């Protein structure tokens, strides 16, 4: 999983280095001056959403730019630091017309509490294809852990345990989007075919690109947090003895770390129903995966509540509770 922006490997531990690294992320050895002083990257001209903070590439030909995520007006700015570019692009395999059809299907399958005729009366206001940023990493991790479990507890509820183990993580996605909510990113990520990554973007004309904005050190902190969380989950899947756990604590030491920056495709659709705007996401590679917002019928909710109250009242009368 080498990258076009990687430099020479670390002279001590042979871990992969990236341009501008001052120290090896694994062993901390200072890098030679040529490894972090030779390359210059262009600064990006981006438009920043005043509402959610997302930044997308700005074209001088664009007029009155709007945020692809929430539709708010954006301001033009120059990034003060060199930009981090996506190294691999996952292509759109869903076309805009299919994304529009997926929205209509989503609105038509809402269930009892959705307003009747929602798919008919909803007005589509915008359909925006875009790539959102994420890191993909693989790492070797040595894990020291302590935990309480029900194994060997005897008459007590809990017994202490501790140990050391090693995990290898491969192709783990870590969201870097500011425009999408963390839960939206987590829901979208498993449905991507990351083996389809290409060196150049391929998608609908006019698709936007959300920029990577975290610093390299910030990105690695995010990856380390993901490693700690995943290690804790794996420990509870057969490493720690017992069936119930509490106070699980982990200390991780990376023995290797390789990252790459991915651009992942999604459609952001905005529609309006009775003067209220809503947002829906259609996966850029899996048209069957749709998540988003939809209105709830107040009349139907009130009818269910009233029905429950009538039923409770009837039961109370039948049992003589109210009569006494």
Image (spheres, rainbow, N blue to C red):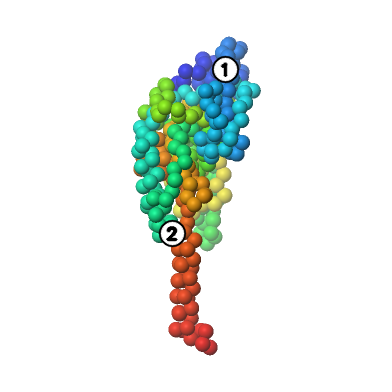
User: Residue at left 36%, top 42%?
Assistant: 101
Provide the secondary structure element on which disc 1 rests: loop
Q: Is residue 76 visible?
A: yes
In this figure, what is the number of numbered marks? 2
In the displayed structure, would residue 137 be above or below residue 295?
above
User: Residue at left 62%, top 23%?
Assistant: 78
**Which dot marks residue 75?**
none
In the displayed structure, would residue 324 be above or below residue 130?
below
- Measured in 3D between alpha carbons, the distance from the residue under mark 1 to the one under mark 2, in whole angstroms, is 51 Å
Provide the secondary structure element on which disc 2 rests: loop
- Crowd rating for badge 1 (residues with CA inside 10 Å; few <14, some 14–19, many 20+): few
In the displayed structure, would residue 210 be above or below residue 11?
below
Residue linked to disc 1: 42
Residue reaching furthest bottom? Answer: 324
User: Relative to the observer, which residue lies in front, 292 or 36?
Assistant: 292
Quadrant containing the N terminus in the rendered view: top left
**x, y percent for residue 110:** 40, 54
Query: Is 19 displayed left or right of 1 in the figure?
Result: right
User: Residue at left 53%, top 40%?
Assistant: 70
* Residue 291 occupies quadrant: top left
**x, y percent for residue 228:** 54, 39
User: Relative to the observer, which residue lies in front, 229 or 165?
Assistant: 229
**x, y percent for residue 95:** 36, 34
Q: Can residue 256 be seen in this view?
A: no
User: Relative to the observer, which residue lies in front, 247 or 183?
Assistant: 183
In the displayed structure, would residue 233 be above or below residue 63?
below
Which one is closest to the eye, mark 1 or mark 2?
2
Residue linked to disc 2: 113
User: Residue at left 57%, top 26%?
Assistant: 46
Query: Is 84 displayed left or right of 269 in the figure?
Result: right
């Amino acid at each position: 999983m080498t990258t076009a922006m990687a430099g020479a490997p670390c002279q001590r531990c042979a871990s992969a280095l990236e341009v501008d690294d001052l120290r090896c992320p694994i062993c901390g050895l200072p890098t030679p001056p040529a490894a972090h002083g030779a390359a210059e990257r262009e600064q990006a001209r981006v438009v920043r959403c005043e509402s959610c903070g997302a930044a997308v590439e700005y074209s001088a030909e664009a007029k009155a730019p709007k945020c692809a995520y929430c539709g708010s007006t954006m301001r033009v700015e120059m990034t003060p630091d060199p930009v981090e570019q996506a190294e691999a692009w996952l292509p759109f395999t869903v076309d805009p017309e299919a994304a529009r059809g997926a929205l209509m299907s989503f609105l038509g399958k809402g269930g009892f509490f959705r307003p009747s005729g929602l798919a008919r009366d909803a007005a589509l206001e915008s359909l925006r294809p875009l790539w959102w940023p994420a890191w993909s990493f693989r790492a070797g991790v040595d894990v020291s852990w302590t935990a309480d479990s029900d194994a060997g507890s005897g008459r007590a509820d809990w017994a202490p345990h501790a140990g050391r183990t090693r995990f290898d993580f491969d192709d783990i996605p870590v969201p870097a989007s500011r425009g999408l909510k963390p839960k939206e990113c987590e829901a979208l990520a498993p449905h991507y075919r990351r083996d389809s990554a290409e060196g150049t973007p391929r998608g609908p004309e006019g698709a936007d690109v959300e920029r990577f904005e975290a610093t390299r050190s910030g990105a690695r902190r995010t990856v380390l947090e993901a490693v700690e969380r995943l290690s804790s989950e794996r420990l509870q899947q057969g490493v720690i003895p017992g069936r119930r756990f509490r106070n699980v604590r982990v200390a991780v030491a990376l023995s290797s770390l390789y990252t790459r920056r991915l651009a992942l495709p999604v459609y952001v659709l905005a529609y309006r129903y009775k003067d209220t705007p809503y947002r829906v996401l259609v996966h850029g590679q899996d048209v069957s995966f749709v998540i988003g917002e939809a209105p709830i019928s107040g009349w139907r909710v009130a009818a269910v509540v009233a029905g429950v109250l009538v039923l409770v009242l009837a039961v109370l009368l039948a049992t003589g509770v109210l009569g006494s």
